[in-house]
Image (cartoon, rainbow, N blue to C red):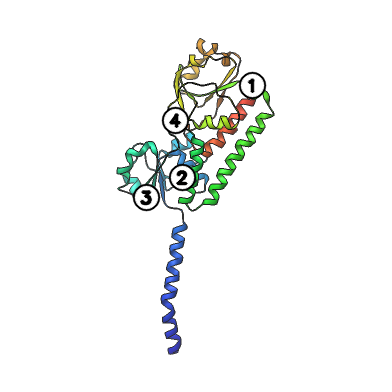
Amino acid sequence: MRRRDFLLGAACAPVMSMSMSMSTARAAATRAPRLVVLDWGLVETLLALGVTPAGAAEVADYNASVVRPLAPPRVTDVGLRLAPSLERIQDLAPDFILINSSQETQRAMLERIAPVRAFAVYTEAGAPYRHAVDITRELARLCACVAQGEALIGNTAAALARHRARLATQPDARAQATYVMRFFDARHVGVYGARSLFQDVMDALAVLNAWHGATDYWGIGVTGIEALAAPATRVLYFDPLPPGVARALATNALWHALPAVAAHRVAALPPFWGFGMLPSAARFADALSQALIGTAAA
């Protein structure tokens, strides 16, 4: 090698090294962070964005309750949502731990491992669908997938508009106000109303909710089945039923006397997590429109 070529290469080496370092930094800045997620609504949103968390809470129960999108086998189960395994989380070495606002009591403990980000979808003020849209954008920015975030928001809005238009062609499907509920046992239910994601979807589909009673900040009113006695209504309940409930309802005279049940305007909905975000909203809109059309035909 000639002396001039050697000196030229030596002079360029720091520049090349700096360029490579800058490229590596840019790549690190744009990659999705390594995440552990303790809230299922955040998990479903990340998966819908194409981001797979390193770890999540109660993965098997998430898949059974949320149903779609499924968490793949490579997502490590870090234990309970309200009592996760700190050892498992630490082993995953996350960049961030994501929680919902009701899990704030865990923040100090979790921040010993990694920075914690908390998100408030369900609040006393309600409007979980609007909050879900805002938080989807936050998650998309955090994970460097802004375009995917906007696509998820747009596709969800389009799905709701499509189901609203579908129901508009079936007047009988929206002829009665509808109770949407979950059985706790054969005599007690949780009815979804104001401040629930399901209420926001019903509003978007122009479906009247038959429940006007009080709800907590998750949007649920706990009541006995006798409160579902409004005339000209229908009842939709979520599967799966708790053990023994189907057998008890079969001989429950109060249940069979309810106007909706007596008129055969009652149907089961597939399993749902009641505190989801946009993926749950789109899936609920589909399930709701199918159930309303089905019970109208009955």
Q: Which residue is mark 4?
A: 218
Q: Picture coordinates of residue 226 (x, y %)?
A: 49, 14
* 3D distance between C-alphas at marks 3 and 1: 52 Å
Q: Give the structural element (helix, strand or loop) at label 1.
A: loop
Q: Which residue is mark 2?
A: 73
Q: Give the structural element (helix, strand or loop) at label 4.
A: loop
Query: In front here: 252 or 227?
Result: 227
Closer to viewer: mark 2 or mark 3? 3
Q: Which residue is mark 3?
A: 92
Callout 3 amino acid: Leu
Q: Crowding near pointer 4: few (<14 within 10 Å), some, many (20+)?
A: many
Q: Picture coordinates of residue 128 (x, y %)?
A: 48, 35
Q: Write down the quadrant of residue 293 in the picture.
A: top right
* 3D distance between C-alphas at marks 2 and 1: 44 Å
* 3D distance between C-alphas at marks 2 and 3: 15 Å
Q: Which residue is mark 1?
A: 175
Q: Picture coordinates of residue 12 (x, y %)?
A: 44, 79
Residue 136, above or below 14: above
